[in-house]
Amino acid sequence: MSGGKLEQDRASKLAGLREAGVDPFGKRFPDALPVRSVVALAPDEGEGETVRTAGRITAIRGHGKSVFMDIKDWTGKVQVHTSLTQLGEEKFSLCRFLDIGDIIGVDGKVGRTRRGEVTLFVDDLTVLTKALLPFPEKWHGLKDVELRYRQRYLDLIVNDDSMDRFLKRTRIISSIRRFLDEAGFVEVETPMMQKIPGGATAKPFVTHHNTLDIDLYLRISPELYLKRLIVGGMEKVYEINRNFRNEGISTKHNPEFTMMEIYQSYADYNVMAELAEDLITGLVRELYGEECKEVSFGGRALKAVKPFARREYADLLEEHAGVRLGDEEGIRRRAKEAGIDPAGLATDFVANELFEKFVEDNLLDPTFVFNYPRGVCPLTKSCEDDPTRAQRFELFMAGMEVANAYTELNDPDEQHRRFEEQVKQKQEEVKVIDEDFVTAQRYGMPPAGGMGIGIDRLVMLLTDSPSIRDVLLFPLLRPQKETS
């Protein structure tokens, strides 16, 4: 039957329900147990307790005066059976109006068939929602990736792995909050719309406030506001929320993404590294059990126990790109050989382009990369033994940056000088200095460590998802082409 005829058939059944005096879009159905709980109540044989549950029909098998159906909710699936004898003629006649995808409520005794399959033997049935569009021919047949992203509701219905992935995402974020709360951090909220986009180097989205007649920017980072709270005496703070960057879309990037940033007074980047290790290994244990020591990503097992590898940025750059930090001529020459145009870029930025091209893909097991070139770290303290390097690490897994941490720069004069340096370099994203942030530092910002963790990428890694779109319920997509 074609799609159009299937829709007509469902519309006819909708009319049939109404003619029978049944509301095809139902009402409240209280006291329904999750399907998982119903299955757990099944005795080893025969019939057990009387229960009530609800779910979406995923299969219908009719045998004259007897009907078997499978129904599922977000906890699981169970077989239900009913018959003319169990329901009575009036209720049983409604079964002919049911289709795959409809949502029903059922009451009956949970038991097992002669073959031992858990089954709910139904003696009352309530139509809760009539589905008007046909579902994929095969219940697990939604293979079109683009369609899965555009119609996530359908993806969640028909693909159990998608539902599981997003429930795991929720567990991951809840676990992160619990971990930080127990460690004495407090969760805060900072502005999504900012007068000056700061805290990172990225192109912002611009909007306009009509009443104040000012342009505002969707934040690229909450960093400078969170540090203001450190100045104010909130010694351990974190925020889990959206950042927005008006840049490219790829398997690792979405213009709107979830970031966790934390700041701790009297700490440094070494403290942040320990925190990251404890957090990530704890998440692995919570998701996959206490004995889990690795996670699978892209067909490869990644180490997931402490200690994570610790490497120096300079050593990795020399090992994989063949150049040494400080060798400006060699770095620029190597960049040209690699197809990178160094014109107009400070040497530290050229070196970082080489690092991204030659090093990052090789960092598979969790690896902390310490002590970045100072020029690419305007908000970071310099290393005590080498002022050309900054007390910053990035944590990589499977070639992706997962975390970025600093020993925070808290010298207001040095911070202002570095902001001026950014403006002079005419970086497109850095047009003005956030003078209020520098003023805040002048009141005294304690030594601190700070870290950002990309929640979406972390979820990708912990759920073996190859694209960031697989872990975003509603990723940004190109406009759909209209069909004539």
Image: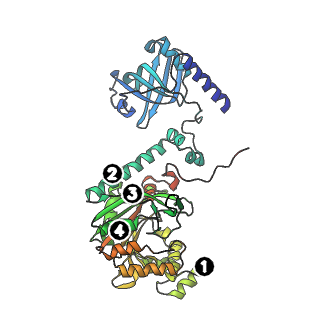
**Of pointers 4 and 2, the one earlier in the residue sequence:** 4
Query: Which of the two marks, 2 or 1, is nearer to us in this view?
Result: 1
Q: How many numbered marks appear?
A: 4
Q: How far is mark 1 from mark 4, CA to CA?
A: 35 Å
Q: What element carries label 3?
A: strand
Q: How far is mark 4 from mark 2, CA to CA?
A: 31 Å
Q: How far is mark 2 from mark 1, CA to CA?
A: 46 Å
Q: Name the residue under label 1.
A: 341
Q: How far is mark 3 from mark 2, CA to CA?
A: 20 Å
Q: Look at the numbered discs 3 and 2 and tell me whether their residues touch, using CB distance below 8 Å.
A: no
Which quadrant of the structure image shows residue 280? bottom left
Mark identifier at residue 240: 3
**Of pointers 1 and 4, the one earlier in the residue sequence:** 4
Q: Is mark 1 on a helix, strand or loop?
A: loop
Q: Where is residue 386 in the image (x, y as percent from the top left)?
A: 37, 85
Q: Name the residue under label 2.
A: 286
* Amino acid type for the residue under numbered disc 3: Ile
Query: Which of the two marks, 4 or 2, is nearer to us in this view?
Result: 4
The answer to whether residue 234 is left or right of residue 335 is left
**Of pointers 1 and 3, the one earlier in the residue sequence:** 3
Q: Name the residue under label 4.
A: 227
Q: Look at the numbered discs 2 and 1 and tell me whether their residues touch, using CB distance below 8 Å.
A: no
**Of pointers 3 and 4, the one earlier in the residue sequence:** 4
Mark identifier at residue 169: none
* Amino acid type for the residue under numbered disc 4: Lys
**Quadrant in which the C terminus is drawn:** top right
